[in-house]
Amino acid sequence: MIDITRRTFVISSMGLLGSGLVPRFVWAGSGNGTAPTQPWALSQSGMAVAPREQLLLDFGWQFAFGNGNDPTKDFGFGFGQGDFSKTGTFKIATAEFDASNWRRLNLPHDWAVELPFVHDDSGDEDDRLTSHGYKPLGRRYPATSVGWYRREFDIPESDRGSRICIEFDGAMRDVMLFVNGCYIGRHDDGYTSFRFDLTDFLTYGSKNHIALRVDARFGDGWFYEGAGIYRHVWLAKTDPVHLGQWESVVRSTITDDAATLDLATLIENESEHPVHASLEWTIVDAGGHTVAQAVSPAQVVAPNASTPYQATATVTHPTLWSPDEPHLYTALVKVLVDGSLRDAEQVSFGIRTAVFDADRGFFLNGKPLKIQGTCNHQDHAGVGAALPDRLQAVRISVLQSMGCNAVRTSHNMPTPEWVAACDRMGMLMMCETRHMSASPGALQQLETMVKRYRNSPSIIIWSIGNEEWKLQKGDMAPQGARIAATMVERCHALDPTRVVSAAVNGDNEQGVSDALDIIGFNYQTQFPDAFHQRHPKRAVFGSETSSAISTRGEYTSDPTKNTVNSYNGVVPWGQTPEQWWTFYGTREWLAGGFAWTGFDYRGEPTPYGWPSISSQFGIVDLCGFPKDYYYYYKAWWRKEPSLHVFPHWNWQGKEGQEIAVWVYTNLDEVELLLNGKSLGSKKVPHLGHVEWTVAYAPGVIEARGRLNGQTVLTERRETTGPAQKLRLTADRSEIAADGQDLAIVTVEALDQHGRRVPTADNKLAFRITGKGQLIGVGNGNPNCLESDKEPKRSLFNGLAQIIIQSTDEPGAVLIDAMEEDTSGHALRTASLVIRTRKAVSGTRRVS
């Protein structure tokens, strides 16, 4: 372990997801000792389950567009003054309302991704539709910017006496909730979780009706955000004496070969009588073994009041959480009133230390670790912002495969599933709130994020915002310093174990930066060295770097086609991967940095406008297909030997013309050959690449990578023939029949010898039959204006993607892919079968 000094910030932390918030890990039962649905650990340890239910409310909804301007097209909402004058008068949330012609769907749902593209560049900068990826949202598009959701559900008579809340993990953006004709409340932030207590409004032993009006005319950012209920919805049922939401916290202090756990929570008593309540804590390791226990003695909790509880426990020989071994513990917290179990929850956490040192960078568990990070928005091809749970983990896996060990949640509170996947898979995180402000609303957003995720071992930095120019320098710098100080203080009060920072594009000498624990620089590498000299006791990292741009599979920049070359494309304020990583990767005192961005994302099309509908910053495209820059990071961020040669070798019509050939590798030396003839060998510079200029001739370009004089890797690019057939490859051959699980299918065009044709752009059609459904398609082309939802898609440089989701019925899904235009020589059809197995256990749902 390293010494702790005043200039060192120690984050001794733990893990996540308190309060039964992990969708797959929810284990609350009905009071009869129901076994947990997932953690192995609880059933193996003989733990009882509390009378708490966390029921998924994603299935069986109805949807229809309203209107942001015309109440006659908005189901009469707002037609007169008296809408809110009396309780129980909103017919749309009653059995009387006829929604028979509404569309049926399941959540999560993003209606923006379903809309057609509209070329509208009216307005200035973020006022234009570029921010939405040219989807018709905003006040200029009232007919497609407001949506209504309806559902009915049963509440049994046996639930009378329980507290019943509806919980939203997030919705975009302004939500009004109505239940049984009654207006319940409003939430107008698109990223934070929120809940409403429905107890007094429900009909017990009968059906209940819920309606939500979601208004997406306004946004929170300047990038694609989606529209609708794009995260999970839950119905939570608890005893009147229960644990407070997100109040259970586990903090660890590591000494020698043990970890002392400081345990804290809050019991709320929503009954009419005082109770004597005690707490029991049971700590379980990843194998299901009990490793520690603690008791919080009984206290009196007054009616309609809450009382804090604390305890300590010791875990001997703890397994520390790290990217290489993301070991998670579980704390089971039980509430006992006069010996009777009244509530319980499980809290996932990890034991680890995280230290930012101004001289030596970042240390995890006492060992130096360079942050090899990427910034990421939350949308994906085919599904927009409504990512199924497994897709969150798939995206993290793609980033990890190139050596990425950290993500920044740009620029908002992430989904619980993203955080859970980072904890489970060993991905570090800079967790960022959306609004930098000391307003009540912004502070509530910050508090929600910190309280919900403060147990997460993956989070090493809280970020209070991004690039607030007015608060960084100039006339408003004093306000910026005060605002940041208030936000930092709030973070420390809620979680004293982590550092707080922000993404600042400036010299960090005033304003917001005055209050930060550690300093983040966005771009502008002319500043960090001088800052370090002037402020040698302040730790520094790259909060946003690079902004390299490229179009997958393209090797010339062509403004007429909106493509960017894959060699050295970069925006004026940015740097290539090689440039920024040479800077941050060679200075010991720099903790590392986060490249902009891991994935391409919709909106903010850069460097071109229409018909570009997405950015081209990604190291991988919207589908997750790697661009060539990906292999630079793989070479220098991973330890195993790596070799990648590009471009492809299909340059018909350019015989004899010079083609730039680059190689990314972490080996010592590379020899390049054309059709078996050596073009010479070159030494590989540290953190660099090697390149040749080659007169094109059809055949084979081959790179041979050597280590200590021995050839250890060889990679070839061959001139292919025309596309002859299709190939479908699923990332999984079997998925759970739970209506949520999915398989991601890669579509390729092959020549007569089975080689992928890197320039193929055939228009394809898909047929899905059996126990599954198509939920999205994509191809990674930033200029593609085809639908993300229809069963067809063009290949882009040889690739396309299909996302298949299961139904509730086991069986098989048959996928057929064929060329849409068969007037000429059609590509040979490809077929694929994915099995769907009966879900052994799953999240309980509302009927």
Image (spheres, rainbow, N blue to C red):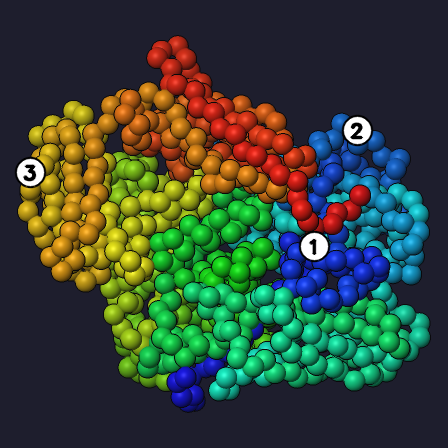
**Disc 3 to disc 2, how far (Cα)?**
71 Å
In this rendering, which labeled residue sits more in front, label 1 or label 2? 1
In this rendering, which labeled residue sits more in front, label 3 or label 1? 1
Amino acid tagged 3: Lys
Q: Which residue is mark 2?
A: 100
Q: Residue 586: x and y, percent?
A: 25, 70
Q: Which residue is mark 3?
A: 677
Amino acid tagged 1: Thr
Q: Secondary structure at mark 2?
A: loop
Q: Is residue 265 above or below residue 343?
A: below
In the rendered image, is residue 319 in sight?
yes
For image coordinates 61% across by 42% down, the residue present is 736
Which image quarter is the C terminus in?
top right
Q: Quadrant of residue 78?
A: top right
User: Mark 3 packing: few (<14 Cα in 10 Å), some, or many (20+)?
Assistant: few
For the residue pair 735 and 383, the one nearer the viewer reads as 735
Q: Secondary structure at mark 3?
A: strand
Question: Relative to residue 683, is residue 347 drawn left or right?
Answer: right
